[in-house]
């Protein structure tokens, strides 16, 4: 089976349980504090590996990031080329309210030190059928996309989080675009998700677009695939952190395995639904067995 090469972010999450998300000028007390491995790239690599994919993760951490390598190794992600530098590992401060909704502040740290050496290593790993996975938490994405295009590498790009840079990227290099409602609106200049999806697929007719809408399911299609609206599973959410990353990792694993878009979304939706019922980021990602059991239960 082809492998997933993730030139992706790694981070440490500080998660605070709160009665409600704070507003400007407000100070509140949290009822819990936990530290979890995180970072969108790391979470997505873990999810893809748990789903059965062969995953190579390339990125940067600081001297404080050893725990992240341990977590990735536990699920057999290849971390040989994760570089340890002097700048601290990405840190995230996450508020999670009693309904499972979150608000996140990120310090990029070592994720913003990706260099030519890292890019060259990532692209040297490619064989026929492999995919490169990117997130908007690392630097120099323009150069990464250019180099991938020059080498005809298949690219899946999760444009998260939006920070203004996303408006300047060359998406003609991207085969699969993965965005949520906020990210789609930023790229399309249209707040309505249905309209944003149509704008993106018409602007980039060869690209598959996967637009996730959390509890409202999502939309996928583009390229040779028709537009499909899918529904989310109804579960009692505890913490939505990393639900999207879980979705992406499971999606990519099935996409690499079968190139079946509907099956990949089915697996991803089930995995994401399980993840929101658990606290934490990487800690909430389910196993392949759990996802299969969940799907069987939903089919009854």
Image (cartoon, rainbow, N blue to C red):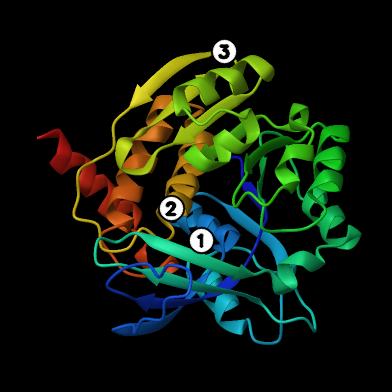
* Mark 1–mark 2 CB contact (< 8 Å): yes
**Element carrying mark 3:** loop
Q: Position of residue 95 (x, y in %)?
A: 41, 71
Of mark 3 and mark 2, the one earlier in the sequence is: 3
- Structural distance between the alpha carbons of marks 3 and 2: 25 Å
* Mark carried by residue 224: 3
| Residue 248, position as x, y percentages in the image | 49, 45
Of the residues under marks 1 and 2, which one precedes in the sequence?
1
Q: Residues within 10 Å of mark 3 (few under 14, many from 20)?
A: few
Q: Nearer the viewer, residue 165 or 9?
A: 165
Residue 236 picture quarter: bottom left
In this picture, residue 251 sits left or right of residue 164: left
Q: Nearer the viewer, residue 270 or 21?
A: 21
- Taking the view exactly as shown, the residue that stands out farthest to the front is 25
Number of numbered discs on residues = 3
Q: Quadrant of the C terminus?
A: top left
Residue that numbered label 1 is attached to: 43
Q: Position of residue 131 (x, y in %)?
A: 66, 40
Q: Confirm whether residue 45 shows in the render.
A: yes
Up/down of 291 relative to 80, above or below: above
Residue 15 sits in quarter: bottom left
**Is 119 situated above or below 210?**
below
**In 3D space, how far apart are the residues under numbered discs 3 and 1 (Cα atoms)?**
29 Å
| Residue 206 percent coordinates (x, y) | 67, 18
The answer to whether residue 205 is seen in the rendering is: no
Residue at 47 percent across and 75 percent down: it is 25
Secondary structure state at the residue bearing disc 1: helix
**Where residue 246 is drawn, which disc sits there?**
2
Q: Earlier in the sequence, mark 3 or mark 1?
A: 1
Q: CA distance from mark 1 to mark 2?
A: 7 Å
């Amino acid at each position: 089976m082809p492998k997933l090469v993730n030139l992706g972010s790694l981070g440490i999450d500080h998660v605070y349980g709160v009665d409600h998300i704070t507003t400007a000028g407000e100070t509140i007390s949290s009822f819990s504090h936990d530290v979890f491995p995180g970072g969108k790239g790391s979470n997505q690599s873990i999810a893809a590996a748990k789903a059965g994919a062969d995953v190579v993760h390339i990125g940067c951490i600081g001297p404080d990031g050893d725990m992240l390598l341990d977590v990735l190794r536990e699920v057999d992600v290849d971390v040989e080329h994760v570089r340890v530098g002097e700048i601290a590992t990405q840190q995230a401060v996450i508020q999670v309210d009693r309904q499972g909704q979150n608000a996140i502040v990120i310090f990029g740290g070592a994720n913003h030190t990706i260099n030519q050496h890292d890019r060259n290593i990532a692209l040297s790993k490619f064989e026929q059928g492999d995919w490169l996975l990117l997130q908007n938490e690392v630097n120099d994405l323009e150069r990464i996309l250019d180099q991938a295009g020059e080498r005809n590498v298949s690219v899946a790009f999760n444009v998260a989080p939006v920070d203004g840079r996303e408006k300047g990227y060359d998406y003609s290099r991207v085969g699969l675009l993965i965005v949520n409602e906020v990210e789609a609106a930023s790229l399309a200049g249209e707040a309505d998700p249905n309209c944003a999806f149509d704008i993106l697929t018409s602007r980039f007719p060869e690209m598959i677009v996967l637009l996730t809408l959390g509890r409202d399911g999502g939309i996928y299609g583009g390229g040779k695939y028709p537009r499909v609206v899918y529904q989310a599973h109804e579960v009692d959410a505890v913490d939505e952190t990393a639900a999207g990353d879980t979705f992406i990792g499971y999606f990519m694993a099935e996409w690499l395995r079968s190139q079946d878009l509907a099956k990949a979304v089915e697996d991803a939706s089930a995995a994401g639904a399980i993840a929101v019922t658990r606290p934490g980021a990487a800690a909430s990602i389910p196993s392949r067995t759990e996802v299969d059991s969940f799907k069987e239960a939903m089919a009854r």
